[in-house]
Image (spheres, helix red, strand yellow):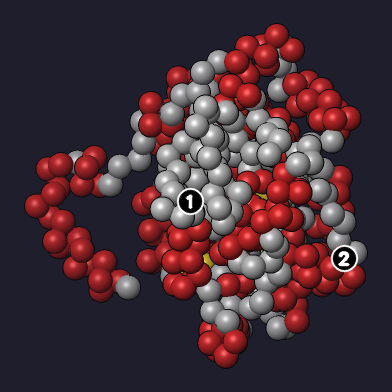
Amino acid sequence: MKHYVNPKFIPENYRQCTKTVMDNIADPNITFDQNGVCNYYYEYLASEKEHIFTGEAGKEKFDENIAKIKENGKGKKYDCILGVSGGVDSTYLAYIAKQENLRVLCVHFDNGWNSELAVKNIENIVTKLDFELETYVINWNEFKDLQLAYFKANVIDIEALTDHAISGTIYKIAANNGIKYILSGSNYVTESLLPKHWIFNKGDHVNIKDIHKKHGTIPLKTFPFFSLKEKHYYKKVKKIQTVDLLNYIPYNKSEVKKQIIENLDWKDYGGKHYESIFTRFYQGYILPNKFGVDKRKAHLSNLICSGQITKEKALEELSQPMYDKEQCEEDKEFVLKKLDFSEKEFEDYINAPRREHTDFKTEQSLYNTYPILKPLKPIGNFVKRILK
């Protein structure tokens, strides 16, 4: 199979799963059984059994969630909140919500990297579905300093910054508007496979602060940090819940794209999460060249596991370049200019060795941070059970 990652990441004992397209380039810690089937295949089956509901069971769970969202929204302006990026999952979820007559407050997080297609897709969602939109625009100077700090730190999960900020922003806007339900586009049939080797805990504000403390250059006064303590507050005290509706209905990626193209004039932007110019460059250039990661392997393997494509089809897609050459050059020039990177500085970054997020401080539980409180842990657990 042709690999689009830096050749230095290809091991001598290269091995690919017999069921999926996951291999020991994607994850050096991957394991195989006696038939050559990798751990990710079995992890998907376990997730499917636990989280995906089909047929009558799925309809029951879906209807039950819609009913409780509507009941809670009585007398309020909105029933629920939905983060929209212009991508497939959030667009389809907005379409489904409209069909169920939910009153949705759409929220978009603008981190300065939106593509024109993403902006147009979001406009179409709120206009055609008659939803209100609140856009949170990040302080660019702070966000740029954070992204540059992650580059200097040579850690892999640069996208944790956006994911962290989105999560905190959604919870805070929900609380400010008295909304109890967050619609999430997360789903197991298209995106449950994700090697730990590729990511880090998106919720770890301590890790973000420490990386910035060591490599940032300006104070962070407005970045929406979201601690575990705050998350517990919104979930336990404000009773804000996340609902994964896409796990309760049939979700076939190609069929879903056809529906939103036909009904919402949605425009395809190529790869998964390529609605952001930075994400497109990060996934299409930085990950394969600096970290040896081709994210298509996980996305396509997920679709194989959920029966949406064959392994042969996945291999055919992997044989194609992950990034159009001209688009890549255009994006590279744009990203380097926006981040004030010289060609030399960027090439030095690409060639520098990877460091782990755990080389920096990480968020610990209250009892690990303050060992003196450990005797009070049973009381804390009792209070948690009451608040559930």
Which residue in the protein does label 1 denote? 36
Residue situated in front as seen by the camera: 385 or 15: 15
Q: Residue at x 25, y 47 (%)?
A: 366
Mark 2: amino acid: Ile
Report the quarter where the N terminus lies. Answer: top right
Find residue 261 and name its label: 2
Q: In the rendering, at what x and y percent does residue 220 appear?
A: 53, 30
Left or right placement of residue 55 versus residue 336 in this view: left
| Figure check: 260 above or below 158 | below
Residue situated in front as seen by the camera: 321 or 331: 321
The answer to which quarter of the image holds residue 122 is: bottom right
Q: In the rendering, at what x and y percent does residue 89 appear?
A: 69, 62
The answer to which quarter of the image holds residue 78 is: bottom right
Q: Residue at x 53, y 87 (%)?
A: 57
SS assignment at label 1: loop
Mark 1: amino acid: Gly
Q: In the rendering, at what x and y percent does residue 282 appear?
A: 67, 34
Query: As drawn, which residue projects farthest toward the top?
Result: 344
| Figure check: 166 above or below 340 | below
Residue 180 in view: no
Find residue 70 and name its label: none
